[in-house]
Image: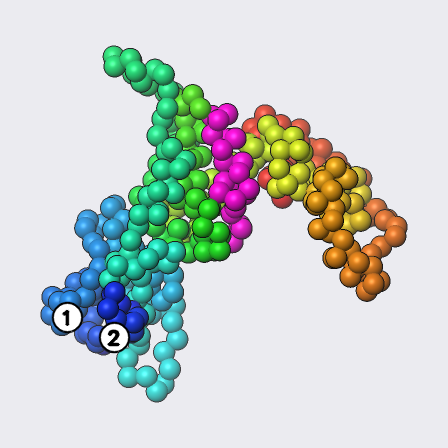
Amino acid sequence: MKVTFKILRQNDNLSPHFQDYTLEVNQKNTILECLNRIKWEIDGSLAFRKNCRNTICGSCGMKINGRSALACKENIGDELKKISFGEGEKNPQIIISPLGNMPVLKDLVVDMSNFWHDLEKVEPYVSTKARNISEKEFLQSPEERKLLEQTGNCILCGACYSDCNAKEVNDNFVGPHALAKAYRMIDDSRDELREERLTQYNDVKSGAWGCTRCYLCNEVCPMDVAPLDQITKIKGKILARESRGSSTPVRHRKVLVDLVKDGGWVDERKFAVMVVGNYFRDVRGLLSLAPVGLRVLAAGKLPFSFEASEGVFEVRSLINAIQSATKDNGNLSENIK
């Protein structure tokens, strides 16, 4: 069958533009195999990265029909199932473009410097005084080692970073790849900087709270590392050790649980004041609420009383049970959410 590949071409001298290449393909062919044929048989100027061809190195990351993926892993048949093919079209089309959130050097090759710099910010390596003793081994039990298996599968392909909405709007955010590696360090029994790391990852803009929980990183990860899950675990451990005064995100989650536990649902009269206004302690925060508060009041949408939900006792018992069951593992509020 024939398939047309619409590839976004660009370099320093030309504006981005799509160029079409039509190939006779087999549905089992991978996208990378097709790109190789285009380069070898049609247009040798096409630029893209590749190496292992076996989902190990992560080099061939790119956007395929708008989704970040590895070209060596995705095949023609699976891609054609995801797209609609109009009657007026001669051939089905597969759109190939470079990864997002990174500057393009040429065609499908991006500059990953910021990707690596963001990773370095979380210090993704074991830090312990013991490693100064050359003859000492880092012994771990099978249970301790098992905690590192999922995050250890990350091949740093950049797919999660490319599709990250938080990174797109907040350049200070280190990205899902970095925080997935960060959680590995927190769970590593050999590391001695766990508390320092949790303090660092508690940063509102660059740390775990910068994540918008869009779930895209989990969806595009080719190795099932589930970066969002790892970020959620970091949040849980931060919540277990930090007080309400630590940061607005910490206070947001703790107040939410307290209000739901108290009344079965959120008392909106108290929520903003307690979170943004820090229980009337933050004057600047309270002043920031004034414009919204006045508009809500004028619209008649500010309740002057609060009535607990009918199932408040059941809700409270569920929260108490979760708090009791998760008290030791540091995932209290995130499990409740």
Place residue 189 in its image quadrant: top left
Which residue is at a point 74% across and 37% down the rendered structure image? Answer: 281
Residue under the image location 39 percent in, 68 percent down: 82
* Residue 190 pos. (x, y %): 39, 21
Mark 2: amino acid: Gln
Crowding at dot 1, Cα within 10 Å, few <14 / some 14-19 / many 20+, comes out as few
Q: Is residue 296 above or below residue 264?
A: below
> Mark 1–mark 2 contact, CB under 8 Å?
yes
Instruction: Note whether residue 149 is visible.
Output: no
Where is residue 332? Give x, y as percent. Answer: 62, 34
SS at mark 2 in the image: strand
Mark 1 — residue?
43
Report the Cα–Cα distance between label 1 and label 2. Answer: 11 Å
- Where residue 193 appears, as percent x and y from the top left, is 44, 24
Q: Is residue 108 above or below residue 281?
A: below
Name the residue at the right extreme.
305
Q: Position of residue 194 (x, y in %)?
A: 47, 25
- Can residue 111 be seen in the rendering of this structure? yes
Which residue type carries mark 1? Asp
Start-end of magenta stretch: 194-215
